[in-house]
Image (tube, rainbow, N blue to C red):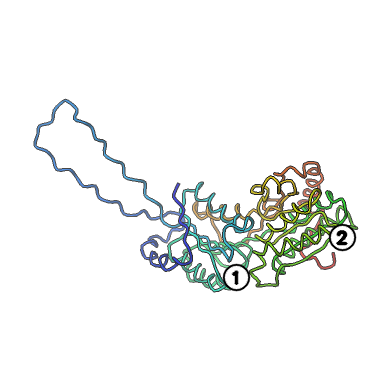
Amino acid sequence: MIKSKRIAVAAMAAVLALAGAACGSDDPVADEPAAEEEATEEPDTEEPATEEPATEEEAAEEPAEEAGPFLGLAFDTGGRGDGTFNDMAGQGADNAEANLSIAVQELEATSDQDRQPNLEALAAAGNKLVVAVGFAFGDALGPIAEANPDVYFGWIDGYYDGPNIITTAFSEQEGSFLVGAAAALKSQTGKIGFIGGQEIDLIKRFEAGYIAGAKAVNPDIVVESAYLGAAGDNAAWGSPDKAKEIAGAWYADGADVVYTAAGGSGRGMIEAAVEAGEGKWAIGVDNDECSFDTEEQKAHRLTSMLKRVDTAVEEMAKNVQDGTAEGGFYTFNLANDGVGYATTCGNIDDIVDQLEDFKAQIIAGDIDVPTSPEGL
């Protein structure tokens, strides 16, 4: 497997410097191999050949040449380590690196001003596919894609029309409906909560689905909602203390299930559930958070709403590699397993049949899940 190249923002200039050497081919599928070193021949000895075999020194094999840049991943602020959205994108890149034998480069934005230069650097480095991770890349991606027609650009959670732009959206409201139903089925108090990151339409889809799913089970259930920041407030994705404070207050006031869609902030919510004690549940987001919870936390992890960003990233890379990639808009939903719910912690085993029934109704179109919480 080709070793992944992880590039810090500070090294962007070095990436740009590599552009001339790396951009050898306009073909979006095949990488141009590096020039092979010519083998130096040993001078012939004048001794006559003997039948007796001399000590055989096998010629050392040339090491396998590393492929050129292929997949460039541009993270927004936060990057890997949030345990949710960004880590799922990173997992997709890791899977693509291992399964497709491609080289991966990464850049992480440390401020809003980094998005455009990071995309430009990854394109200039010779990557065949550059993936922008997150809705905030909208202003930067279009012009850069137009200036680099031989590079495919993927955009997670966005839309831009272009022949070399692959944009993806997820039906978060559908997966959130199922975890909302789980919350209502498990609640003993009839009071649950939702914590969002930035108060934007994207996160309101999570809230809307959650409320709708809960009310499909119990029309009288009380759902508290709070957001950690306004649109553009990047701290909303990394404020676990704030999420912990809100969730803790709700648990103390009688809520027994809280769902957080706020990136790394959600780690504070699971801490609040543990501290609140038995019967207090936390629902994770994007990733299967049970997979890295402590044993104590697993006892309070009801489920997680899965958003398969990993699948989207790996599929884009595969399609670019095999020549089937096309610009366009692609939706990941319950019908194609783009969203779903986790059962890893074993805390919803007794209600899975009911959740699967709701899932079947959504896929069949019998339940139309709202995308806005207004009026719910």
The circle drawn on residue 138 is: 1
Q: Compared to 345, does 261 lie above or below? A: below
- Helix, strand or loop at label 1? It is helix
The circle drawn on residue 343 is: none
Q: Residue at x 82, y 63 (%)?
A: 224
Where residue 289 appears, x then y in whole percent? 67, 51
Q: Residue at x 82, y 45 (%)?
A: 354
Q: Compared to 12, does 176 lie above or below? A: above
Where residue 33 appears, x then y in whole percent? 36, 53
Where residue 50 appears, x then y in whole percent? 13, 28
Crowd rating for badge 1 (residues with CA inside 10 Å; few <14, some 14–19, many 20+): some
Which image quadrant is residue 76 in? Answer: bottom right
Position of 176 with respect to 77 (left or right) is right
Type of amino acid at the residue the image marks with label 1:
Gly
Position of 115 with respect to 361 (left or right) is left
Where residue 139 appears, x then y in whole percent? 58, 73
Name the residue furthest right: 220
- Helix, strand or loop at label 2? It is strand
Crowd rating for badge 2 (residues with CA inside 10 Å; few <14, some 14–19, many 20+): some
Q: Locate the C terminus by quadrant.
A: bottom right
**Foreground residue among 263 and 294:** 294
Mark 1–mark 2 Cα distance, whole angstroms, equals 36 Å
**Foreground residue among 14 and 229:** 229
**Foreground residue among 314 and 133:** 133
Q: Earlier in the sequence, mark 1 or mark 2?
A: 1
Nearer the observer, disc 1 or disc 2?
2
The circle drawn on residue 222 is: 2
